Image (cartoon, rainbow, N blue to C red):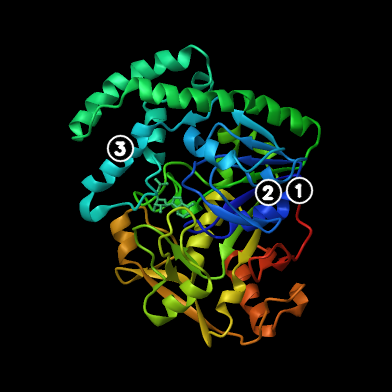
Amino acid sequence: MKRMVVVGTQWGDEGKGKITDYLAQRADVVVRYQGGNNAGHTVVFDQKKYSLHLLPSGIFNKNITNVMANGMVINPEAFAEEIKPFETFKLAISDRAHVILPYHLEIDKFNEQLRGDHKIGTTNKGIGPAYTDKASRLGMRMSTFVHPIRFKEKLMEILEPMNREMYGMGKGNLDFNTIYEKFSKYAELMRPYVCDTSLLLNELIAQDKKILFEGAQGVLLCLDHGTYPYVTSSSPTASSVPVNTGIAPWLVEGAIGVTKAYTTRVGSGPMPSEILGDLASHIRIKGNEFGTTTGRPRRIGWLDTVILRHSKRVSGLSYLAVTLLDVLTGIDELKIAVSYTLDGITIDKVPAEIEDFEKCLPNYITMPGWKEDITQVKSYEDLPENTKNYLIKLSELVGVPIGMFSVGPDRNQTIMVKEIF
Ligand code: IMP
C-alpha cells in the first residue's frame, strides 16, 4: 500500500506515534489530518526526548515532506514552541487549517466549569471552541492569519463579540494590541510554510509518493462515531481523511488500526471493560499510562472487541497494530470483552445514547496469560504460544489481520508481521 492511514481504534493513546514513527521511515510524506495540540506522543531520537503535539511524525527526517492538513486546528504559540528544536525539515501547513487563538482556551476552560459533574475532561487546549468557530463560520483560516493585512482586520472584527463573551464569562477584556503583536510574530514564522496542501498532496500522489496519514486521538473519540458527548471535536477515522486533506476517497488505499493489548481512556465517559484496583494500578505503572499532553493517569480496562469492531466498521481497518503487548506479561488470565448486556439483552454494538452505553455490562471470554519476557522477541514466531493465541483470538474477533505488534517503547521493539507499507 502506498497511501495508508494510521488510526487509533480505541479512546486515543494507543501508541499511534510509535507506529507512525516506525512506518514514517518508509514514507515520503507524513500528513496530520485532524485535531491539534490535544494529541501527544513522545519520540526518543538521537538520545533526546521530544514530545510532539502538532507536528507530523516525519519532522525528524529531513527527506520527508510533512503536511499539516486543512482538518487541523493549529495554535500558533504551541507551533512556535514545538518547532524550535528542529533546524532542517520539510513542512507545509494548509491555508485552510483553522487557527486557535487565546480566547478559545478560555472558552474551553469555562465550558468545562459550566458542565459541573458532567465534565468531558478536555485537554483545555481550545480544540472544541476552535472547531465550533469553524462550524459557525466565525473562525480564522491560516490563509487569513498569515496575510499581512487581513489578520489585523479579522482579529479586530472577532475581538469585539469575543470580548462580550469574555465579559459574560466574568473574564477581563482581551487586548487587541497585545494579541496582535504577539501573534504577528507567529504569523511571520508560519507564513513560508502555508500553502494549498490539497494541491501539494495531489501532486505528490501523481508522483507516486508513499504517504502516511497520521490520525490523532481514536475512533471512540470521533465527533460522529464516538461516545458522544465524551468525544473530541474532529473525526480521527480513516474515512475522514479525504475531506480533511482534500484528496479523493479512492486514493486512500488502507488503514492500520492501532490498538493496545488492553484498553485505556483519559477524561470522563463510560468504559464498559474498565478495571479498578490493584490490577489497574499494576498495568498503569507498567504501561506508563499517564497522558503525554496533560500528565493525567489513564483509566485501564480489558481489551474490548465490541469497540474494535465498531472502529473497523465506521473507519475501515485493513490491519491491526497491537501495542504494549509486553505490559500483559505475568497476568495469569486475560479477559476480552466480546459483547455487552444492555437491559438483559446481549448486544454487539456501541449504543448512540451515552446513558445506554453507561449501562452496558461486558461479556468476557478468558484467555490464559504468559510469563515469558517478550521484550526482546524479533518476530511473531518468537512469541510464546499463549501470546500468539491471544493475538489470533483478537484478530478473529475483530475480523482484521495483525500487521504489526510491539513489545516495548524502542523502535526495534516494533515488529512487522506482514509487509504492509
Ligand atoms: P479535547 O480534544 O481537548 O476537546 O478533549 C475531548 C476528549 O478527548 C477528552 O476526553 C480528552 O481527554 C480526549 N482526548 C483528546 N485528545 C486526546 C489524545 O490525544 N489522547 C487521548 N484522549 C484525548
Q: Earlier in the sequence, mark 2 or mark 1?
A: 1
Q: Earlier in the sequence, mark 3 or mark 1?
A: 1
Q: In this rendering, would 213 be left or right of 176?
A: right
Disc 1, SS: loop
- Looking at the picture, tell me which residue is in the foreground, 247 or 111: 111
The image shows residue 391 at horizontal and vertical percentages of: 64, 73
Q: In this rendering, would 419 be left or right of 297?
A: right
The residue indicated by pointer 3 is 107
Taking the spot 28% from the left edge, 19% from the top edge, the residue there is 160
* Badge 1: residue crowd in 10 Å (few <14, some 14–19, many ≥20): few
- Which amino acid does the dot numbered 3 rest on? Ile
The residue indicated by pointer 2 is 254
- Which amino acid does the dot numbered 1 rest on? Met
Q: Is residue 297 above or below residue 187?
A: below
The image shows residue 93 at horizontal and vertical percentages of: 60, 30
Q: Are marks 2 and 1 in contact (CB under 8 Å)?
A: yes
